[in-house]
Amino acid sequence: METIYYIGLDVHKKSIAYCIKSVTGKVIRRGVISADRKTLRQWLAELPGPWLGAMEATLFTGWIYDFLKPHAVELKVAHPAMLQAITAAKKKNDRDDAEKLADLLRVNLLPECVMISEELRELRRIMRYRNLIVRTATQMKNKISGLLMEVGATYDKKRLHGKRYFGQLLERVEDVPESVKELLCLSRGNMELFETVQKKLIKILRENPTIRERVKRLRSIAGVGEVMALTWVLEIGDPNRFGSSRQAISYCGLCSAQRESAGKEQRGPISKKRNKHLQTILVEAAKLAPRWNPQLAALHERELARGHGNRATLAVARKLVEFMLAVDRRGTIFMAERPSVAA
């Protein structure tokens, strides 16, 4: 029977510390190599045999994972927060971290996190960049308002960002320094540029054949728009990785942390162990979805009657997760439940 080796990889920007162990825990080899493809290719050629690998999720993990995965029997990525809790120690360095990863992999205790496909990660990168562009455009809008308020100029808030109104505003405002007018024009130009870029990025994602049908099915849910559907598909990846809607709700950061000890249970604030991109878009969608979805509107009204608006919004966001998870897993369009008719 061919010997299998276990390799822990502590990944950094410029270097990778590694530790190779046998199934009995004996250290076969350890060292540090440069984090570049040429060096990794040479390192792969010198490995003693078939291997299983583990690395921690970092900013640099993606490309290394894609490069090494075809050469490994299995390659896993560890959840950094859970890994830190397991391997906490006074002595910490790259060599020890690599050895701990190898040991956790060897005894099957590695807190693994999901790595979605390379293609979906590429699309997700585009989506997250688009979200950054939108936030920057919003900052530009706020800056335009701020500059006008600084110099005491009056304006119509609802029409301010219209192209025609903005041009007329610059012509009629009085006692405004030329430097402020130049800054207003610069901010306006940047805002228009950012809006053009974000629309172009959305078009790229919309037309991608890999996710087009999934997005179309999700948009059959009243209250789920294109951005919400795209974010769900690209952040969730495979919906079947969730055993229940509760797990998906927890992943999206829509439930509170639970602490139980000596028979006493205490609920804290909304957990910060979540996918922040999904949490943000779901909360925003939950504020608007009741306008178009009668089921969500009824849920919102029922929760709002208890006297807390934020809880009502969270309840709607959780229901949206349930709807989207069901549609995504079944692969069919959404069918709303019909109210039962009394006999």
Image: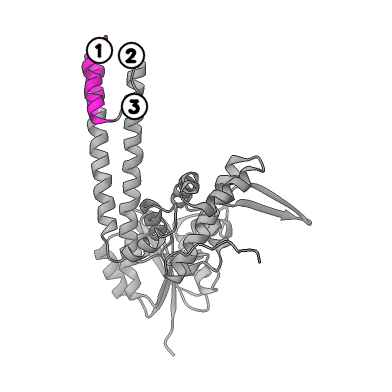
Which label sits on residue 245?
none
What distance separates the C-alpha of mark 3 from that of mark 1?
Answer: 16 Å
Identify the amino acid type marked 1.
Pro
Q: Quadrant of the C terminus?
A: bottom right
Q: What residue sits 56% from the left and 66% below the top?
A: 244
- Dividing the picture into quadrants, the one containing residue 30 is bottom left
Which label sits on residue 151?
2
Looking at the image, residue 187 sits to the left or right of residue 226; the answer is: left
- Dividing the picture into quadrants, the one containing residue 243 is bottom right
Between 106 and 334, the one lying in front of the other is 334
Residue 5, percent from left and from top? 43, 77
Instruction: Write the start and end of the magenta stretch as one range.
Output: 162-186
Residue identified by numbered label 3:
143
Residue identified by numbered label 1:
177
Q: What residue sits 62% from the left and 51% below the top?
A: 257
Q: What residue sits 33% from the left and 52% below the top?
A: 127
Q: Is residue 32 visible?
A: no
Tell me which numbered mark, 2 or 3, is placed earlier along the sequence: 3
Q: What residue sits 58% from the left and 51% below the top?
A: 299
Between 321 and 21, the one lying in front of the other is 321
Q: Badge 2: few (under 14), some or many (20 or more) residues near its Cα, within 10 Å?
A: few
Tell me which numbered mark, 2 or 1, is placed earlier along the sequence: 2
Residue 180, percent from left and from top? 26, 18
Question: Does the CB distance between marks 3 and 1 fall below 8 Å?
Answer: no
